[in-house]
Amino acid sequence: MSHKDFEEDSAELEGAELPEPTFKTEPAVPEAEKGEKIGGFAFFLSLSMLMPTGLLLVAACLTGIRPIDYQALAIFAGACLFGLLLGHSAIRGHISVLIHESKHAIVSNLVGNKRKGMQIDERSGHFTYSYTKRTAHFNFIIALAPYILPVFTFVGTIASLALFRHDHTLAVLLVGLCYGTDTILNVRDISPIQTDITSVRGGYGMGIAYIFAWNLVIFAVLLTWVFNGSEGLLDLLKLTTEAFMRFYSLLSPSAAPE
């Protein structure tokens, strides 16, 4: 995964009005040839599952909202807004690039790839790794990791479970703050010049669809927790499991009970 300065490829982008990201990215597949796309069956299968799942979960959360839930929603929204502003103003330069590259590294290491190096500059950087045939189908999620991985939210959730297990309001404040920070970091560098995104099969539009779907599912899960706490997450897990079982039975009539 390499990042280069904004000036590169300027001839191709001359005259185009594009949003300016914090830095420009290059594909997260060091061995790939120029122009080669990443993502195949696993990419499209996960997208086809994530998008409807996220939409259904958000719809279920909003249709079941109670008057008492509006207070928790207001607290969560306010904390998210503060997190957005804090992340946008405080996380810049080397820190922003470090977080971006570290997300590539986290996913790459989790799937078993070999780390080869990382370089961090103020407006550019790169993470390189080697992969095998067994892990090649994870390349698309490694490339898109900086736009979908909620590292601050994960840390905030762990901290809230440890510190505010019996105070849901403070837990919502902390997680909302972290989620707002993650959100601004995940979307700030989205741009048609980011080849993290354009390198996936289907191009920029398909990459954006995957980023949206993944973040939609994360938002739905958090919203369920904000409204109903840990019990809500258990109910959500049960609902999702039952839905997938029904879907599987429809696709496989022989698996359905007689």
Image: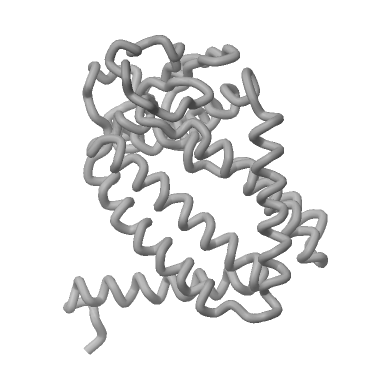
Residue 211 horizontal side relative to residue 146, left or right: left
Can you give x and y, in whole percent of width and height, for residue 114 in the image? Answer: 44, 23
**The C terminus - image quarter:** bottom left
Figure check: 155 above or below 101: below
Residue 50's place in the image compared with 44, above or below, is below
Relative image position of residue 161 (x, y in whole percent): 74, 57
Please name the colour scheme applied to the rendered image: one colour
- Residue nearest the observer in this picture, 98 or 107: 98
Who is closer to the viewer here, 62 or 240?
62
Can residue 230 be seen in this snapshot?
Answer: no
Question: Which quadrant is the N terminus positioned in?
Answer: top left
- The residue sitting at 42% across, 17% down in the picture is 2
Rendered residue at 17%/78% (across/down) = 254
- Count up the numbered dots: 0
| Residue 258 in view, yes or no | yes
What residue occupies the far bottom of the structure in this picture?
258
Q: Left or right: 139 with respect to 125? A: left
Q: Residue at x 46, y 71 (%)?
A: 59
In the picture, residue 55 is in which quadrant? Answer: bottom left
In the displayed structure image, the side of residue 101 where residue 91 appears, left or right: right
Residue 174, image x and y in percent? 74, 52
The residue drawn where x is 41% and y is 49% is: 212
The picture places residue 237, in percent across and down from the top left corner, at 50, 69
* In the image, residue 108 above or below residue 224: above
Please identify the quarter of the rendering in which residue 248 is found. bottom left
